[in-house]
Image (cartoon, grey):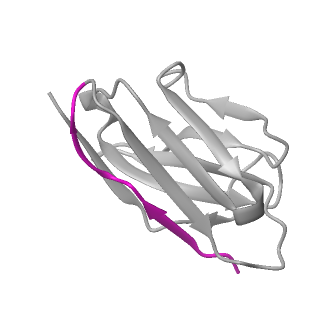
């Protein structure tokens, strides 16, 4: 079993920046993909960005050129640097992890709220 603990959410004005972090508990399970999803009120959870152990990244079109995902494999930690934030980025952000490079995550964090005011 893998536990994911997120931090870094909060309230920011439009145009501002936030950095999310997520640490996976130590486990004998080899984590490959880590990433971030988000869910706004009344909407389905959607992919924001993912990164494989090898460093291959994937972004939603809505966040390309504004958000950057990175990870520290040695610490099983993933980061999401969010710049030029918009009110439509307001959502609960969930960290994810999986044993495969692609496909649905196997584990989820508890979520952290990001609110962008106009």
Task: Assign the N terminus to one quadrant of the image.
Answer: bottom right
Position of residue 50 measured from the top left corner of the image (x, y, whole percent): 66, 42
Q: Is residue 64 above or below residue 58?
A: above
Q: Tally the numbered discs.
A: 0
Give the side of residue 116 with respect to residue 100, left or right: left
Asked if the stretch drawn in magenta spans residue 8, the answer is: yes
Where residue 107 sits, quadrant-wise, is bottom right
Asked if the stretch drawn in magenta spans residue 18, the answer is: no
Position of residue 103 measured from the top left corner of the image (x, y, whole percent): 75, 48
Name the residue rendered at 67%, 76% in the picture. 2
Q: Is residue 2 above or below residue 108?
A: below
Name the residue rendered at 79%, 62% in the picture. 31
Name the residue rendered at 78%, 45% in the picture. 52
Where residue 116 sits, quadrant-wise, is top left
Where residue 112 sits, quadrant-wise, is bottom left
Residue numbers of the magenta segment: 1-14
The one nearer the camera, 14 or 87, is 14
The one nearer the camera, 60 or 14, is 14
Could you tell me if residue 44 is visible in this image?
no
């Amino acid at each position: 079993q893998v536990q994911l603990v997120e931090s870094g959410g909060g309230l920011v004005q439009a145009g501002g920046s936030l950095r999310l972090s997520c640490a996976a508990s130590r486990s004998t399970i080899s984590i490959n993909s880590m990433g971030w999803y988000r869910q706004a009120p009344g909407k389905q959870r959607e992919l924001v960005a993912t990164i494989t152990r090898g460093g291959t990244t994937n972004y939603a079109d809505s966040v390309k050129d504004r958000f950057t995902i990175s990870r520290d494999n040695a610490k099983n930690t993933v980061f999401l640097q969010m710049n030029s934030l918009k009110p439509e980025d307001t959502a609960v952000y969930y960290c994810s992890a999986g044993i495969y490079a692609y496909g649905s995550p196997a584990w989820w964090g508890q979520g952290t709220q990001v609110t962008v005011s106009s």
